[in-house]
Amino acid sequence: MNFLFKKTKTTRFLFFLIADIILIFLAIIIAFLLRFEGIIPEEYFIKGTLNAYVGLAIFFCVMFFYVFGLYSFSWSYVSTQELVSLLKAQTLAFTGLGTAIFLLRGFPFFDSFPRSVFFISYFIVFIFCGGSRFSKRIYLNFIGIRQRIESENTLIVGAGDTAEQIIRSILSSKNTFYNPVAIVDDNNIKQGISIHGVKVLGKIADIPDIINKKEIKQVIVTLPSTESKLIREVVEIVREQGIRKIKIIPHLSEIIAGSTSFRNLKDVEVDDLLGRDQVILDTKQIEKFIKDKTVLITGAAGSIGSELAMQVAELNPLKLLLLDQDETGIFNISNNISEKKQFLKIVSLVADITDKDKIENIFKTYSPKIVFHAAAYKHVPLMEDSPDEAVKNNIFGTKIVAEASIKYGVEKFVMISTDKAVNPVSVMGLTKRIAEMICQALNNKNLTKFISVRFGNVLDSRGSVIPIFREQIKKGGPVTVTHPEMKRYFMLIPEACLLVLQAGAMGNGGEVFVLDMGKPIKIIDLAKEMIRLSGYEPDKDIAITYIGSRPGEKMFEEILSAEEGVIATQNKKIFEAKLSDIPESFLNQIEKLDLIIKKGSIEEIKKELKLLTSQKF
């Protein structure tokens, strides 16, 4: 019998179904008793009027309750939306019931049916069936709240729909440490209003006073992620009051069920304060670009490749080919996508892009139509020590995949490039610029369209400063920064990948697109922000030390060289670099690198790389 008490969809359905049948029966009995002042006339029993009315009422109510999903709602989170659904369902049910009584009026059991009973029973059924569903919510709001003994006074920032959802979910649960006692919002119209009993007491500027008066211990910011400047202002005000418990809502892409609960809240991360504008896309163009096509992503286990894979999966490709040397990473990303897109055909390919035979076999077997080439060695200092490996992977690996794309009829080849390819000084930057040039040269006389997309650092990618700083802070410091004036461009990984998809969709071949990276950020400022977000003070709780620039690093990365200009495109965040055409003969020149990396020194490799990139065409 334990299954009867276990909370499942089936037991919830059975509970409310049985409850509705009993309550509708009782409601009709009460309606008759009220109509006839406590005694139901015997004729209604003899003619079967009572039985017929009860039977039809149960039939129509249960049918319309089911159609409107009243047996599938989670009534712990019931709101006016569910109340309206109940009212609609019952109104339609009683419309059907009234129609049935009218059509059956010639039969004895309905020939003298009291119309007042019909209207009385309508209201009583609504009260009973609504009460059974709202009772848990009422209990949690007015009685269960007393059980949240350890909850802390919480300030809600923002008085919009998201705040309503957050407060409602808190009040509907006794297992929470939040006790919302005040709201702030800069909208004048919302001053003084209440949301589920929690009042708007002022504006963001009033936060310090409200924190003191209401003894606030934690803050929930319900502002959208696009309001990063305002979120930053709120975080700074709150931190000045000594409060470290600050939660925000996740990005829209992270909200699965379409609504927000206190269980979705997350800590403030540095990317929440970056100040990036919302990405506006031509979604139809991107969908047409990907839908029903076999898509290959190289470097699919990396930060960019894995995010690209997840975004491409949402666009309904015919087949998704994920290629990387990292077998664990490929296994993980394939599993993650398979859980969300169960009907998508995913092929996991463990392969090295420098293995020409293996790559050609993959293209021959699966015939991809779109290729996103994200595989590359990107670690600047490491590539200074191993330029031969950078040449093999970033140059010859790109050439192998690109030539296989031409041979096997790929429609578009989109290469992920970097801002380090502009006026390159590092081995990594030099090899990526040559990879761009290979794509330009191959585009000249082939049906395959080659496109490169150039952007800067992405936040929280593997091996980048964010995870390094995070680990250093976790260990108590020091946080190491190369130079106090070092600056870098930063983007969010999802933002970069969305723009890569847009650039790939709109490219006609031969372009090097440049993404709008916003303003460069000082690495020292990033380090200080991360320390503060962790609840510490820079140079007081966590030390910051300067270790000097590493080999191949520039103080300031550029998106364009002095000779390069840009052409605006249909998307305000994507520009096309005005570059000289690269002749097909350039492909013969890079073959010399193969001999140099086999027997040459590190300096000879670097010298040849600089020679190749400095040519004027």
Image (tube, rainbow, N blue to C red):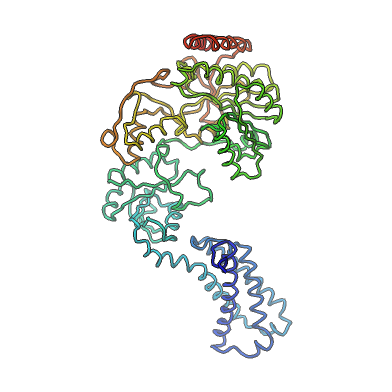
| Residue at the spot 35% in from the left edge and 51% down from the top edge | 184
- As drawn, is 332 to the left or to the right of 185? right
**Please, is residue 510 above or below residue 157 in the view?**
above
- Indicate left or right for 71 with 141 as reference: right
Q: Exactly how many numbered labels are in the figure?
A: 0
In the image, taking residue 585 as reference, residue 235 lies left or right, namely left
* Residue 396 showing in the rendered view: yes
Residue 478 or residue 575, whichever sits in front = 478
Q: Which residue shows up at 44% across the image and 67% down it?
A: 138
Quadrant showing the C terminus:
top right
Vertical side of 338 occupied by 522: above or below: above
**Could you tell me residue 294's position as x and y percent?**
67, 33
Q: Position of residue 590 (x, y in %)?
A: 58, 12
Residue 215 at what x, y percent from top left?
Answer: 28, 54
Give the quarter of the image for residue 120.
bottom right
Viewer-side residue, 191 vs 69: 69
Residue 402 location, x and y as percent?
A: 63, 22
